[in-house]
């Protein structure tokens, strides 16, 4: 039984026969690569010189010194870097247990001089590594260097250009199809395509990630397309400062555009489709200090998913359509920093989710929330404001708790506000609350809707004044809500629609590099409901 299936079993065990619980809708598995740890390479030491990690951890060495250094393993290990100039980095994911020594050939030898060790073992838990996505670390403030590395003029491949880049450099990629997977470990570089629709990273359904940024703060990726990867199109892991702008990600085997365990980020002017998990994802951050705006997400299992992501997180002025499920922030104990909460979902068009043409993942658990526009599961103090939700197949907006993997680990849904939305055209309920009571402080007000569960939901769970009515009157019908037998089978991600050409980044060929930092401020009060 998988961890998701175990969570579902617990959920069903906790549900009384006449009560509905939406369980485990967007359970993002811990992303491939696990944690990211940074080792600082200085003149002439590795810091820390002794490191213990669990298998699957990515270690990033960044040269903070004034001289060149390299990472060279003692005999018998298949990893290692070339010489790294000051500011350059190297990353490697340790797949299995072992005690591994390494050194810099310029300043040490096996067991001598500039030498260090990594111990990899299953006894090292996730709690031993503090999440990057937590705490009060400031946003990076990184400047452009003025240097440009052009692909293929200066480097034949994007990876070759990235390996040459130093902080603040611009990697400018000419139109073409690049059959490669790019790993970025150097802080503050900008990777940009000259033409968004013709500068394409293609995984040929063999490579894992289009561009993966590991532990490198302030990296921006702009005006590119990533398609046909077995994992993710664009991926940031363990960073402070990230930006994905004017990106297209389609037919990728896990997520489209994805940030994990990271803070201070923005996804904007971008498009994601055909992912059997979610088109856009931000997970394991609190506070996230993140913004998603002006994006389109369609034909995915989930348009947006965010496990344990909240705190200064805004999802605004975007379109989530034709997915199996639209927007699904959630709390879950397979990642750290639960519960999810304090997110704002405002001014979005969330329509016609429940599409038969959307990608479907392998695990049947997601079928439970098929056809819902916005579902908050175990969220705390989220605000769902002035969205338009027409024609979602099963339900418009649903608030529900989520159990953890053990019966005692229940994530209640409390303090969520559903205000000023226009919801219509659903089969079961336009607005719904499952296994929550007025005491949980979830509230509904000033919405335009036709049906709700319970009946008269704005009187039963008002945002001002006392509760009036019976929260059990007109509760969600178990047979309809849990019945997945009529759900369409969904498509293999490799067979989802190819998107049309997307809008270009203005001045892509000439604009100066701008490393990622704090996202711009958004005045939520000025966000209006789309027509």
Image (tube, rainbow, N blue to C red):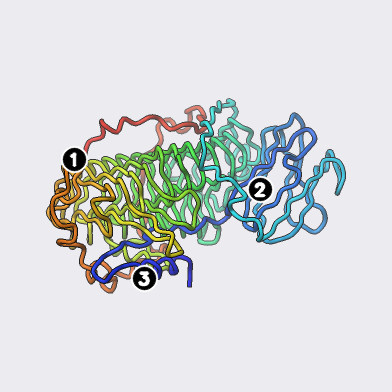
Label 1: how many Cα within 10 Å (few below 14, some 14–19, many 20+): few
Q: Identify the residue position indicated by label 2 in the image.
A: 59
Q: Which label sits on residue 464?
A: 1
Which image quarter: residue 318?
top left
Identify the residue shown where x is 53% and y is 47%. Answer: 211
Q: Using the numbered discs, state the Cα–Cα distance from disc 2 to disc 1 in whole angstroms.
A: 51 Å
Q: Is residue 483 above or below residue 410?
A: below
Q: Using the numbered discs, state the Cα–Cα distance from disc 1 to disc 3 in whole angstroms.
A: 34 Å
Q: Identify the residue position indicated by label 3 in the image.
A: 13
Q: Is residue 333 left or right of residue 67?
A: left
Identify the residue shown where x is 40% and y is 30%. Answer: 520
- Along the viewing direction, whichever of 512 and 22 lies nearer the viewer: 22
Q: Is residue 137 left or right of residue 247?
A: right
Residue 309 in the image, given as x and y percentages of width and height: 43, 46
Q: Secondary structure at mark 1?
A: loop
Q: Using the numbered discs, state the Cα–Cα distance from disc 2 to disc 3 in whole angstroms.
A: 40 Å
Q: Earlier in the sequence, mark 2 or mark 3?
A: 3
Question: Could one spot residue 52 in this view of the protein?
Answer: yes
Question: Could one spot residue 200 in this view of the protein?
Answer: no
Q: Is residue 314 left or right of residue 513?
A: left
Of the two numbered discs 2 and 1 in the rendering, the one whose residue sits closer to the viewer = 1
Identify the residue shown where x is 77% and y is 31%. Answer: 67
Q: Earlier in the sequence, mark 1 or mark 3?
A: 3
Which image quarter: residue 369?
bottom left
Residue 33 in the image, given as x and y percentages of width and height: 58, 54
Identify the residue shown where x is 82% and y is 53%. Answer: 74
Of the two numbered discs 2 and 3 in the rendering, the one whose residue sits closer to the viewer = 3
Q: Is residue 433 above or below residue 311?
A: below
- Along the viewing direction, whichever of 27 and 199 lies nearer the viewer: 27
Q: Earlier in the sequence, mark 2 or mark 1?
A: 2
Q: Secondary structure at mark 2?
A: strand
Residue 343 in the image, given as x and y percentages of width and height: 36, 42
């Amino acid at each position: 039984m998988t961890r998701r299936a175990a969570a579902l079993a617990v959920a069903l065990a906790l549900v009384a026969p006449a009560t509905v619980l939406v369980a485990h809708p967007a359970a993002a598995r811990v992303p491939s690569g696990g944690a990211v740890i940074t080792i600082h390479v200085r003149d002439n030491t590795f810091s820390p010189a002794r490191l213990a990690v669990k298998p699957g951890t990515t270690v990033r060495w960044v040269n903070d010194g004034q001289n060149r250094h390299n990472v060279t393993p003692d005999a018998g290990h298949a990893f290692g870097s070339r010489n790294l100039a000051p500011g350059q980095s190297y990353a490697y994911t340790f797949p299995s247990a072992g005690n591994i020594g390494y050194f810099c050939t310029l300043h040490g030898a096996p067991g001598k001089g500039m030498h260090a060790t990594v111990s990899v073992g299953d006894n090292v838990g996730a709690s031993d590594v503090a999440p990057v996505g937590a705490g009060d670390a400031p946003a990076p403030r990184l400047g452009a260097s003025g240097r440009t590395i052009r692909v293929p003029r200066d480097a034949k491949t994007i990876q070759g250009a990235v390996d040459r880049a130093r902080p603040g450099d611009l990697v400018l990629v000419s139109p073409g199809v690049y059959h490669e997977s790019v790993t970025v470990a150097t802080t503050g570089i900008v990777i940009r395509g000259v033409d968004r629709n013709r500068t394409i990273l293609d995984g040929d359904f063999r490579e894992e990630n289009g561009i993966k940024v590991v532990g490198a703060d302030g990296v921006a990726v702009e005006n590119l397309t990533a398609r046909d990867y077995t994992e993710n199109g664009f991926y940031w892991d363990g960073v402070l400062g990230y930006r994905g702008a004017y990106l297209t990600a389609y037919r990728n085997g896990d997520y489209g555009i994805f940030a994990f365990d990271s803070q201070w980020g923005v996804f904007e002017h971008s498009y994601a489709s055909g992912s059997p998990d979610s088109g856009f994802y931000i997970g394991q951050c609190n506070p996230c200090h993140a913004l998603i705006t002006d994006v389109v997400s369609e034909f995915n299992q989930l348009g947006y998913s965010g496990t344990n992501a909240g705190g200064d997180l805004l999802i605004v002025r975007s379109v989530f359509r034709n997915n199996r499920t639209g927007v699904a922030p959630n709390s879950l104990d397979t990642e750290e920093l639960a519960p999810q909460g304090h997110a704002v979902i405002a001014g979005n068009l969330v329509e016609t989710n429940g599409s038969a043409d959307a990608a479907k993942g392998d695990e049947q658990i997601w079928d439970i929330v098929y056809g819902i526009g916005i579902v908050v599961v175990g969220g705390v103090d989220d605000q769902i404001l002035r969205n338009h939700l027409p024609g979602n197949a099963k339900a418009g907006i649903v608030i529900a708790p989520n159990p953890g993997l053990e019966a005692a680990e229940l994530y209640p849904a409390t303090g969520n506000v559903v205000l000023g939305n226009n919801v219509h055209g659903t089969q079961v309920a336009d607005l719904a609350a499952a296994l929550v009571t007025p005491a949980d402080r979830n509230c509904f007000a000033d919405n335009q809707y036709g049906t709700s569960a319970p009946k008269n939901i704005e009187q039963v769970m008002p945002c001002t004044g006392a509760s009036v009515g019976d929260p059990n009157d007109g509760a969600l019908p178990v047979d309809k809500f849990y019945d997945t037998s009529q759900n369409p089978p969904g498509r293999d991600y490799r067979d989802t629609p190819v998107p049309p050409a997307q809008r270009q980044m203005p001045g892509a060929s000439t604009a100066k590099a701008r490393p990622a930092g704090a996202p711009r401020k958004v005045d939520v009060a000025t966000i209006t409901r789309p027509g």
